[in-house]
Image: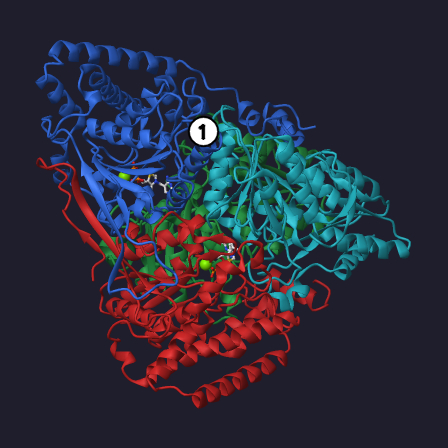
Chain colours: A green, B red, C cyan, D blue
């Protein structure tokens, strides 16, 4: 047992998966000697050797594409895309091939691969290093989309993603990489890929979020608690497939819901959650479902970044509107 | 036959050199064995010494062309979907397949049914695929071969992964990936060539250069004098063959496959052929090229060429031809009937292969689709 | 005045735009001599010459990327992507550059370009020729996303898209290309890019849709009318930026809403519309907001395609559930 | 100096040829003028006859290096964002800019501030950009130059569009696009090279080959003996120069730009240099390379090399050096102060440049952001 942060938990899960299954490979730009620009693959080359940890040339499309070929051959490639800003060239392979190989061959070939990528803002990074594109992937049939929000969930969900027989896009909140430490037992226990996590139980309002925004959301819940409001905080964790029931149950209990995410509001995955509530949870709604999200603008460079990221204040503002609603 | 000869290891901390200094030199070679009339231009490779393999190659081309004709007939009568004919290009696909081993993996584009049939994809499967049925890609024969790839060039990176798998497992197997001249303009193909070079993979890329990408002629596709020279950018070997001489294709791919199997790394082979047909049954090539452009290429026909050669060598006679045509068309008619008699899969199969196990919300959709109310 | 179909209307708008503005260029695969695989650019080469109508090599990423360069230089490129199944390699350029050039240069450079692509299924096409990826683009700040549903709207909206100073993704429903003919006056009159179109007025239920699904939706409205139910049918047309007000007004009037689209349900743009209703229109809702969409599966090959595309029957089923709701 | 020599126009309907037949031959040449000590190895180009241009090039490199040092200092003290040093690579950027005309358009990667400064991008603008302020890309000087491009290689297709614009408008202007060795593995770069060839565009690509892509050395990036040979795949000219010899870079790019301006089409130039610094201020290069790998390359330093040459020719003396360093550091300190004294833009500017005119729902978000309740 040791106290580790989220990126160390990713590293631990990778090492564990590689140790227990020789088919698991790690590949990407700077994952070998460098150990990844965030050290997520640190030490794996030394431990598992150059046949298991491969530095690729600088070519995201082919990184995804060769992973499809490896997966079809029975390997379990875990490809790192250095930042989500560079994942777009890989979309063609993910949409047109990885997500379809099983279906188009009626199960003859399949694609057990994971594409990992640091995601989101708040690290004062340069341009194209702070995006949150999860909604683009959550719309693609055949893919799974997973976003951990703590070291423990990063460990358990990444193990599950690597063991999953189908392609998984695993987006790691860069802002949380070194934010908090947690005791983690390296017991190889995976977490379910079809379940939300209730981070905090409550009865007055449901706050639904994922990834880095869990921090501001939990902060808002604390503030509300101090005001005597009991907020339930749900970490969606696996966006696709979505655990609708857990969210509906919570909303049935509270009757009020605010959805929080960092990606731009329009077409963000919060819309899907709100839509499901509007269909299946309408009866229990006591107030409009609000979304607190990134603006529908380009992610600003660091000097204005803090005005873009949803703040605890914005979450509280929305929560109070929803709570005050009669 | 190294096509890339490196002159000097570039010294970073360089001593004075005489200018201008040639640091690398490359050449692209072209090979063929039969002239368009079927006459041998040079000693033939061993596999062409006896009749067996040549007749097999001939049969493969005849089968491919007959399938082609049937597919077009079915499409014209509304019983098959849009279909891309390989008329006149049969030697490329068949030459590739003839050079591969069963345990190798083939990653086709969409104009290589001659190779797919050779490798054991059934006529019924091909009809099913082009008829719009996913079962057409569930090959009973070559289980590891990739399905037809429609998004041009996107299977080139898959071939890198497959070949890398072979290399990592220390298997003496080779991946062969075929694509067209148009595909050579795609970035993913360039990325794949480069990666194959970096890892020296057991991988053979074959460019099925039929000189057209729908309406775009080769000259508008690239300024490169040859497509084989795309290999130079990746630091791998590239060569050009007469793609209408099945012996040349079989020989060049055979050499490349053997080299790859022996750990010698990847090769890019440009097979020069010509698309005699429309791009697909949905295309009307007269909009962008004239009969005058096309007709001279009929004289290059790979099937006539090999037949003339076989007849000239006394290996093939009228009776053999008739027997073959009869056999082939019987097989194709039988397969077409089987295809036409195959009902579509149930609607629920839309859901069943999206993931290995059906997620809850998809299971609800499946129920809804089957008429039942959603939960 | 002449009766033309949707693809002819696209052609007419292109010719009109090219005639009135020398900066307008048409480029893509097979757009010149071939006139486009659907004939959308038929005759443009002959009329405007090879400097205005350019066949490109087969490279979608660079087609989008070179359009960014042309647009930054003051041209107005209209790039054709042959099918939306091949638009994915262009996403990197659209997300990382086209949509951002104005913002990242604080207005110094801009990107007035249009990417046109036939979209959607129902034409019994081969694999990768029947996708509806509009939601992926509607999530991208800086882009406009437009989908016409009739010859007249194709003409007016495409003119507006080409004249727009910012990048527009213009998705043309392949299924409607030759479906219906309409009298169109080639008067160069554009249609607004920030407005929904009410295709049919009604008071009992609001059916919101776009593109090819307008047909089945109008069909369902007819059937409902025969049963004495007055359905209002809204063609969203411009998904981004979304004309929320028109939709909310209609829902305020009817209190009931079904959203119909061909793309997979989860993360489809219908979710955004439902979410906005759930927030701003909740008060007026008399029933849950339902969505009738493509299943969350890979688009099937032609033999099963009809089981995938939302049918009039499925729309009616949902509408009746919503109408029956107390 | 044609790098691609086409031997035979491939006859499709070919008469017998002798085998094996070389159909295309290429060579890559390397050029330099000064050896690492600054001694001329051959007659210098005209521009290097007198002192004026050489001194300007020298100043450009010194300025770039001084900016580099200041940027790193600011970053280390938390006053600038992550910054990619160009230490040791100054000759590439400055040689490029020195060969361009004002009306040409430069499309940089992220390690060419030496070129940006030469072309009129201000020191303050560069500090602002690397400080995380969009105004840093709103160049007051070269209004048509592209901003720094972070997604590797993605600006290569932009350069194709810019050069195509020049060609369509019949303007005698040239686009120059710079990127690194790692970028040459990207598909979009290959697509751009190929398109530049097809349209014979007035476009010069310069590979800033510093032998590293973060931790990935050139040998793991490609199997190609040179990066200049990436041009062969596109059928355009490619050559290699000593990227630490600013005279060689200036001369080669000058030739390519003149050729492009005269309608002679595109060129790919590989400039051989070495990244002496960490990849960026966020990188620790000792994780993947040793000092022993790096130290020999210090002897290649382009600034020392040119200074030795100038001193040797009596063009440059200690006093000149002192004057220059004083002038440069004064300018940089002044610019840094201006940058540090520049408050961020208002939060509303996040919205104002998303579209030319603010759509209604974005206007509502803008109001909400400014504290006002949404409507
Ligand atoms: C990425 C992509 N873009 C466009 C298309 C549409 N399309 C189908 S085949 C084709 C031309 C392909 O030319 P080539 O690679 O030479 O193969 P050929 O058809 O000649 O065999 C095009 C543009 C596609 N299938 N994939
Ligand atoms: C498409 C893309 N992938 C990954 C990155 C992350 N990254 C930034 S610089 C770099 C290495 C670039 O190497 P090279 O092209 O040689 O340029 P250099 O940094 O050496 O100047 C990488 C991988 C990126 N910026 N863009
Ligand atoms: Mg072709
Ligand atoms: Mg480099």
Image quarter (top left, top right, bottom left or bottom right) of the N terminus of chain C: top right
Q: Position of residue B221 (x, y in %)?
A: 43, 50
Q: Which residue is mark 1?
A: A301
Relative vertical location of residue C123 with respect to residue D337 in this rendering, above or below: below
Q: Chain of mark 1?
A: A
Q: Position of residue C82 (x, y in %)?
A: 56, 51
Relative vertical location of residue B135 with respect to residue D195 in this rendering, above or below: below
Q: Residues within 10 Å of mark 1 (few under 14, many from 20)?
A: many
Q: How many marks?
A: 1
Residue B144 showing in the rendered view: no
Q: Left of A166 or right of it: where is C239?
A: right
Q: Left of B351 or right of it: where is D89?
A: left
Q: Left of A308 or right of it: where is A154?
A: left
**What residue is at 71 percent from the left and 38 percent from the top?**
C156
Residue C48 showing in the rendered view: yes
Rendering quarter of residue A38:
top left
Rendering quarter of residue D47:
top left
Q: Position of residue D98 (x, y in %)?
A: 28, 23
Along the line of sight, the residue nearer the viewer: B189 or C265:
B189
Q: Position of residue D256 (x, y in %)?
A: 30, 33
């Amino acid at each position: 047992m040791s106290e580790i942060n989220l990126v160390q938990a990713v590293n631990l899960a990778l090492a564990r998966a590689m140790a227990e299954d020789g088919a698991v490979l790690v590949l990407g730009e700077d994952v070998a000697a460098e150990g990844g620009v965030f050290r997520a693959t640190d030490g794996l080359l030394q431990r598992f050797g150059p046949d298991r940890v491969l530095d690729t040339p600088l070519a995201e499309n082919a990184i995804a594409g060769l992973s499809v070929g490896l997966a079809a051959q029975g390997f379990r490639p875990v490809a790192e895309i250095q930042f989500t800003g560079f994942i777009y060239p890989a979309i063609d392979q993910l949409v047109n091939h990885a997500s379809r190989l099983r279906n188009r061959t009626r199960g003859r070939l399949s694609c057990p691969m994971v594409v990992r990528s640091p995601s989101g803002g708040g690290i004062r990074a340069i341009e194209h290093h702070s995006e949150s594109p999860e909604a683009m992937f959550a719309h693609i049939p055949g893919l799974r989309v997973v976003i951990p929000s703590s070291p423990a969930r990063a460990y358990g969900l990444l193990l599950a993603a690597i063991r999953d027989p189908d392609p998984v896009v695993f987006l790691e909140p860069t802002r949380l990489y070194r934010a908090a430490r947690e005791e983690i037992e390296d017991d190889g226990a995976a977490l379910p890929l079809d379940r939300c996590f209730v981070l905090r139980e409550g009865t007055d309002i449901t706050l639904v979020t994922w990834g880095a925004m869990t921090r501001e959301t939990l902060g808002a819940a604390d503030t509300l608690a101090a005001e005597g409001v009991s907020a339930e905080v749900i970490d969606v964790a696996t966006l696709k497939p979505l655990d609708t029931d857990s969210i509906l149950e919570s909303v049935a209990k509270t009757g009020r819901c605010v959805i929080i995410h960092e990606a731009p509001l329009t077409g963000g995955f919060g819309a899907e959650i709100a839509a499901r509530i509007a269909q299946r949870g309408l009866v229990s709604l006591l107030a409009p479902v609000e979304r607190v999200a990134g603006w529908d603008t380009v992610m600003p460079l660091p000097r204005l970044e803090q005005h873009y990221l949803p703040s605890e204040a914005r979450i509280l503002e929305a929560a109070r509107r929803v709570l005050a609603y009669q | 036959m190294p096509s890339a000869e490196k002159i000097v290891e570039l010294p970073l901390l360089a001593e004075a050199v005489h200018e201008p200094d040639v640091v690398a030199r490359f050449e692209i070679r072209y090979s063929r064995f039969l002239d368009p009339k079927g006459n041998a231009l040079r000693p033939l490779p061993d596999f062409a010494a006896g009749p067996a393999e040549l007749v097999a190659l001939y049969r493969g081309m005849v089968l491919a062309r007959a399938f082609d004709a049937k597919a077009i007939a079915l499409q014209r009568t509304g019983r098959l979907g849009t279909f891309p004919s390989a008329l006149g290009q049969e030697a490329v696909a068949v030459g590739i397949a003839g050079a591969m081993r069963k345990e190798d993996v083939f990653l086709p584009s969409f104009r290589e049914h001659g190779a797919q049939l050779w490798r054991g994809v059934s006529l019924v499967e091909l009809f099913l695929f082009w008829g719009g049925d996913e079962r057409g890609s569930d090959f009973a024969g070559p289980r590891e071969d990739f399905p037809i790839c429609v998004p041009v060039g996107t299977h080139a990176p898959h071939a890198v992964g497959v070949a890398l798998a072979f290399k990592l497992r220390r298997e003496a197997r080779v991946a062969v990936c075929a694509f067209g001249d148009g595909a050579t303009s795609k970035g993913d193909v360039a990325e794949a060539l480069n990666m194959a070079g970096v890892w020296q993979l057991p991988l053979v890329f074959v460019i099925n250069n039929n000189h057209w990408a729908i309406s775009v002629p080769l000259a508008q596709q690239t300024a490169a004098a040859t497509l084989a020279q795309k290999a130079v950018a990746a630091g791998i070997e590239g060569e050009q063959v007469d793609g209408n001489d099945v012996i040349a294709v079989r020989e060049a791919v055979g050499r490349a496959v053997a080299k790859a199997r022996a750990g010698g790394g990847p090769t890019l082979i440009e097979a020069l052929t010509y698309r005699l047909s429309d791009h697909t049954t949905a295309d009307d090539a007269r909009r962008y090229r004239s009969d005058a452009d096309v007709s001279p290429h009929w004289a290059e026909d790979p099937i006539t060429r090999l037949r003339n050669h076989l007849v000239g060598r006394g290996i093939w006679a009228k009776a053999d031809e008739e027997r073959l045509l009869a056999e082939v068309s019987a097989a194709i008619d039988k397969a077409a009937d089987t295809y036409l008699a195959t009902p579509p899969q149930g609607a629920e199969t839309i859901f069943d292969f999206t993931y290995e196990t059906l997620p809850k919300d998809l299971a609800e959709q499946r129920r809804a689709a089957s008429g039942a109310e959603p939960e």
